[in-house]
Image (spheres, grey):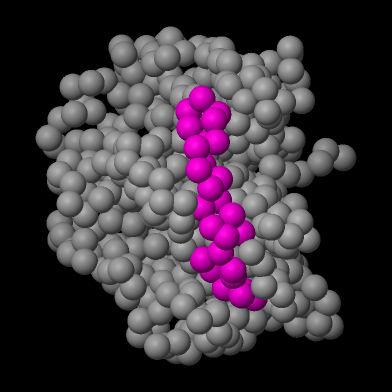
Amino acid sequence: MKKRYLFILLILLLTFTPISTNQVSAQARTLSWSVIVWYQNVGDQATPVEVNIFPENSNVPIVYDAGVIEASGTASFFAGDVHNISAGFRGNAVLSASQPMTATMMFFNPNQSVRMFSNGFTTSDGSNQFLIATTLSNMWSRTTIFSIQNIEAEPVTITLNFYDAEDGSLASSREYQIPANSSKYIEMDKNTDTGLPPVFNGSVIIDAVKTANGQPARVVSSANELYTNRNVGASFGGLPLDRASNKVYLSTGLCTAFNLDTYYAVQNTSYTESVEIVVEYFDLNGNSITTDGPYAIGPGQKQSIRTCDPSSGRNMTGFSGSAVITTTDPSGRIVALGKAQTQRSKPSATFNVFTIFNGEERGYSRIGFPYVRWTSDSLYRASNNMGTDQRTFIAVQNLEPTAAKVNVYYFDNNGEIVGVHNLTVPGFSKVNTNPHLADALGKNGMNPGMFGYYTDGSFGGGAILEAHPDNPTAEFIAIVRVQHPGWGEDYNGIGLD
């Protein structure tokens, strides 16, 4: 009997205030969002893919046959094309295949250029405790909506514990039941969901037990952070407790570089003990340039950190590099995420750049990228580019103290290699790769000068990073920026070992 691999996705499909297709909303919070799921076969054989989609609070699936995907190939399905799904739906999905898979979701509105990306989870990511390092309600003109998916075959009871970022207090606690394989959505600006005041800045710890016997249960969680005054948002996954660590790596650190700054949200995973952290910044050559902190973080609380404002007083203007966040006590455990966003005073050309990505507690010698694109210069920069013509830029960070080699293989939608980028990454530093640098454009039916865009009107293309045979155990992390001028969002490269 062949092993079945399950990949878990939380889907928001036209889930907020429904609007007509020709209506323009003034804020992402009330936009209707649709979802396309892009998935990648990272095994060595072709596999059929079956999708089971569960409406919120229902254990009855909608079954969708997604066809066969070749080894190393990529494919997608639009949730709106699935029978029995219509405007207003929200829920979750489980992809089933005989080969290991990666997947990322693209949230979009057809009238807006903004795209949001969030990765799915494997069953091994399920945990009885999940952490979302930042949750906002009408704070900095943003509100969070997050969802919790039950991956058990029986009902579970979840407890949400919200912690205030300012004083560290337990601001509210809520309990919900979720049917087998289904999900629950929490809108942070709804008091009935959270018990919180209208304005809130904090974090949440999600605990799950099986309703029948109180034993630990497995759940996963994802979040969207949406502006309330413009059509901009970003998406990210929560983190299971076993991804918490005393050291977290963030492959992007910026201060006024590319008109962007980075902000980090660092959450203490303990319910009882405080932790102290320091942030060390590294330049593109892997040199440590300054240390920020220490910061004390109470139980469950988050600490917000801006790259431009280290406590050392160093002038960070123009900085582009990476960061490592460490607890001063090795027994402390934290999770962290990064945000890159436009400075308020900068030109409108970057006004809509807003990205969120997770910090990584470890590196990988093999990483998958299920969504990679490169459009032509004329389409990329066209004034009417509403987000369909994109370019992806992959930032690869070496977690080793010495230089390490890495190969990045670019695949067409049928799993054929169309380009390879061989890189040497300095110790603790990062380098960039993209389909153009790998000479992967215009191959195997793709439009000339493009990657992932085909002459027959179809789409698809991905990449896999592998440590070079000279250093097969070297560990890397990676962030993928999906961008066109004036807009951009990130997703984490997905570790495969």
Residue 356 lies left or right of residue 400; in this view the side is: left
Q: Nearer the viewer, residue 406 or 53?
A: 406
Bounds of the magenta segment? 277-303
Residue 47 lies left or right of residue 289; in this view the side is: right
Q: Nearer the viewer, residue 297 or 69?
A: 297
Identify whether 356 is placed above or below 444: below
Residue 278 at least partly seen: yes
Quarter the C terminus occupies: top right
Identify whether 456 is placed above or below 192: above
**Residue 413, percent from left and from top:** 50, 24
Query: Which residue sits at x=64%, y=64%?
Result: 276
**Residue 142, percent from left and from top:** 32, 68
In the image, farthest residue toward the left: 383
Residue 299 location, quadrant: bottom right
Residue 232 lies left or right of residue 197; in this view the side is: left
Identify whether 122 is placed above or below 397: below
Residue 274 lies left or right of residue 163; in this view the side is: right
Residue 100 within the magenta-colored segment of the rendering: no
Quarter the N terminus occupies: top right
Query: Which residue sits at x=50%, y=43%?
Result: 290
Query: Which residue sits at x=64%, y=52%?
Result: 326
Residue 279 within the magenta-colored segment of the rendering: yes
Q: Nearer the viewer, residue 64 or 243?
A: 243
Residue 208 at least partly seen: no
Identify whether 312 is placed above or below 210: above
Predominant SS of the magenta segment: strand
**Residue 71, percent from left and from top:** 64, 25
In the image, farthest residue toward the front: 313
Query: Which residue sits at x=49%, y=75%?
Result: 165
Q: Nearer the viewer, residue 371 or 468?
A: 468
**Residue 240, percent from left and from top:** 68, 60
